[in-house]
Amino acid sequence: MLYLTMSEVIVKNAEDYHGNLKIIVYDVLDRTIGNMYLDGLSVLVKPNLLSAASPEKAVTTHPRIIRF
């Protein structure tokens, strides 16, 4: 199993949850793990969940992010 430790933080802005979030998620993955050989491996991305609130308030991780 491959474990990565990172101190880099990447913040990406999405105007809403109806755009192409997959492109944003893949861009973050590319900036963090880059060209690492991951073919055939699973990658876990742990979004931070802050508190109970509706997705429109953008306080919690929107369900569309989890679906990738």
Image (cartoon, helix red, strand yellow):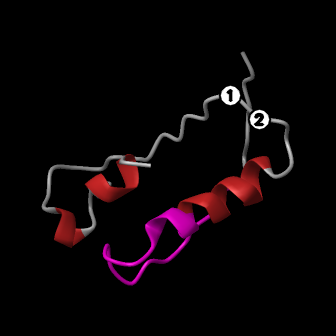
Is 8 drawn above or below residue 16 in the view shown? above
Comparing 38 with 54, the one in front is 38
Is 22 drawn above or below residue 38 in the view shown? below
Q: What element carries label 1?
A: loop
Mark 1 highlights which residue? 41
Range covered by the magenta-colored residues: 9-24
Query: Label 1 to label 2, Cα distance in Å?
Result: 5 Å
Mark 2 highlights which residue? 38
Mark 2 Cα-neighbour bin, 10 Å: few <14, some 14–19, many ≥20: few
Q: In this view, does 48 lie to the left or right of 3?
A: left
Q: Quadrant of residue 31?
A: bottom right
Comparing 7 with 66, the one in front is 66
Comparing 15 with 39, the one in front is 39
Instruction: Decide whether residue 39 is among the magenta residues.
Output: no
Comparing 57 with 21, the one in front is 21
Mark 1 Cα-neighbour bin, 10 Å: few <14, some 14–19, many ≥20: few
Is 1 drawn above or below residue 14 in the view shown? above
Residue 8 in view, yes or no? no
Which residue is at 13% across, 62% downward?
54
Which residue is at 49% across, 77% downward?
13
Q: Main secondary structure of the magenta part?
A: loop
Which residue is at 20% across, 70% downward?
57
Which residue is at 61% across, 30% downward?
42
Q: What residue type is labelled 1?
A: Leu
| Spot occupied by residue 16 in the image (x, y as percentages of width and height) | 33, 79
| Spot occupied by residue 34 in the image (x, y as percentages of width and height) | 81, 52
| Spot occupied by residue 1 in the image (x, y as percentages of width and height) | 72, 15
Q: In which quarter of the image is residue 2?
A: top right
For the residues bearing labels 1 and 2, Cβ distance under 8 angstroms:
yes
| Spot occupied by residue 5 in the image (x, y as percentages of width and height) | 73, 34
Q: Which residue lies furthest to the front in this view?
A: 40
Q: What element carries label 2?
A: loop
